[in-house]
């Protein structure tokens, strides 16, 4: 499956457009990770525990978006975007979305 943030795919002809596809992942923070984050906050630096959590959520959202596109018969997704939101204290959602298309 081709994923691109652009509206076209160089060298490919879009033969069908299936519409919006999306995938999301909501994750809650872990108490152990929070304690490590507090320590990092004091000394500074990247909070790698949260970076890993966000990366896993992003990959899961992309996988779900791709699965939705495959069900429609698409072989590419154009205009891919990501957004995030806070659902409640300690719970965040990552949303991946784009337009499912068929290319030749």
Image (cartoon, helix red, strand yellow):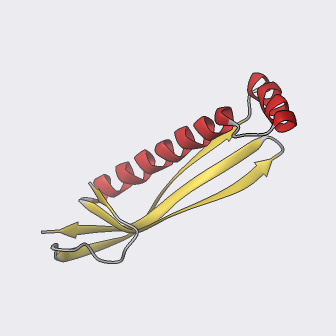
For residue 100, which quarter of the picture?
Answer: bottom left
Above or below, 85 against 99 in this view is above
Q: Which residue is drawn at 65% across and 57% down?
A: 84
Q: Quadrant of the C terminus?
A: bottom left
Q: Is residue 74 visible?
A: no
Q: Where is residue 77 in the image (x, y as percent from the top left)?
A: 34, 64
Q: Where is residue 56 in the image (x, y as percent from the top left)?
A: 53, 38
Above or below, 5 against 22 in this view is below
Q: Which residue is drawn at 83% across and 29% down?
A: 39
Residue ranking furthest to the right = 42
Residue ranking furthest to the top = 32
Q: Where is residue 13 in the image (x, y as percent from the top left)?
A: 16, 76
Left or right placement of residue 77 versus residue 43 in this view: left
54 or 87: nearer the viewer = 54
Q: Can residue 95 be seen in this view?
A: yes
44 or 34: nearer the viewer = 44
Q: Residue at x 73, y 40 (%)?
A: 45
């Amino acid at each position: 499956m081709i994923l691109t943030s652009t509206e076209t795919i160089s060298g490919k002809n879009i033969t069908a457009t299936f519409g919006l596809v999306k995938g999301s992942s909501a994750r809650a923070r872990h108490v152990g990770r929070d304690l490590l984050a507090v320590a990092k906050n004091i000394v500074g630096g990247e909070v790698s525990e949260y970076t890993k959590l966000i990366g896993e959520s992003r990959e899961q959202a992309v996988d779900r978006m791709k699965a939705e596109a495959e069900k429609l018969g698409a072989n590419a997704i154009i205009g891919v975007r990501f957004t995030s939101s806070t659902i409640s204290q300690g719970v965040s959602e990552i949303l991946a979305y784009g337009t499912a298309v068929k290319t030749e």
